[in-house]
Image (cartoon, helix red, strand yellow):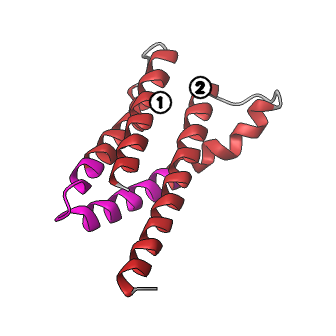
């Protein structure tokens, strides 16, 4: 799961940089996905060490859940934008929607990993 965390972190960093460039570097808030990505990748890197893995991965999944909750608004506005509706700041809606999808996928993978680890420890 540590390597998966690093990959999701890199994806968020890329999303943040692309969003920032796509919006002509007008607002630093376009980099929010990148900030989440740096922390997520750092937790993944920390999780490569067996000694810190459990705590790092729990913190990473908690961060993923916070990231999803913070961007779900963009996800709900995305269908309207895709069907030709007008939204305020369409680039932000797209970035938030993509981040929300990445975060919920990451949380689901993390929860599945936790369940598998618990089963492996209990011998089931």
**Which residue lies at the image location 44% right of the left edge and 80% below the top edge?**
119
| Apparent side of residue 75 relative to residue 34 in the rendered image (left or right) | right
**Front-lying residue, 45 or 99:** 45
How many tags in the picture? 2
**Considering the image in quadrants, where does the N terminus appear?**
bottom left
The picture quadrant where one finds residue 55 is: bottom left
**Which residue lies at the image location 41% right of the left edge and 24% below the top edge?**
17
User: Please, is residue 5 above or below residue 50 in the view?
Assistant: above
Question: In the rendering, at what x and y percent does residue 67 appear?
Answer: 46, 50
Q: CA distance from mark 2 to mark 1?
A: 11 Å
| Apparent side of residue 69 relative to residue 20 in the rendered image (left or right) | right
**Which residue lies at the image location 47% right of the left edge and 74% below the top edge?**
115
Residue 15's tag is 1
In the rendered image, residue 57 lying in the magenta stretch gets the answer: yes
Nearest to the eye among marks 2 and 1: give it.
Answer: 1
Residue 91's tag is 2
Q: Bounds of the magenta span?
A: 43-68
**Front-lying residue, 25 or 13:** 13
Task: Check disc 2 and report its element: helix, strand or loop.
Answer: helix
Question: In the rendering, at what x and y percent does residue 12 appear?
Answer: 43, 37
**Which residue lies at the image location 48% right of the left edge and 67% below the top edge?**
111
User: Magenta stretch mostly in which secondary structure?
Assistant: helix
Question: In the rendering, at what x and y percent does residue 24 appear?
Answer: 47, 12
Question: In the rendering, at what x and y percent does residue 3 appear?
Answer: 35, 48
| Apparent side of residue 107 relative to residue 9 in the rendered image (left or right) | right
Instruction: Identify the mark nearer the N-term, 2 or 1.
Output: 1
């Amino acid at each position: 799961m540590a390597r998966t965390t690093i990959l999701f972190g890199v994806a968020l960093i890329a999303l943040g940089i692309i969003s920032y460039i796509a919006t002509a570097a007008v607002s630093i808030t376009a980099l929010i996905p990148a900030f989440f990505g740096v922390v997520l990748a750092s937790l993944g890197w920390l999780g490569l060490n067996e000694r810190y893995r459990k705590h790092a991965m729990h913190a990473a999944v908690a961060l993923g859940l916070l990231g999803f909750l913070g961007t779900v608004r963009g996800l709900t506005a995305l269908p309207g934008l895709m069907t030709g509706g007008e939204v305020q700041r369409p680039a932000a809606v797209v970035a938030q929607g993509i981040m929300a999808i990445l975060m919920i996928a990451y949380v689901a993978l993390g929860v599945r990993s936790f369940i598998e680890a618990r089963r492996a420890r209990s011998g089931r």
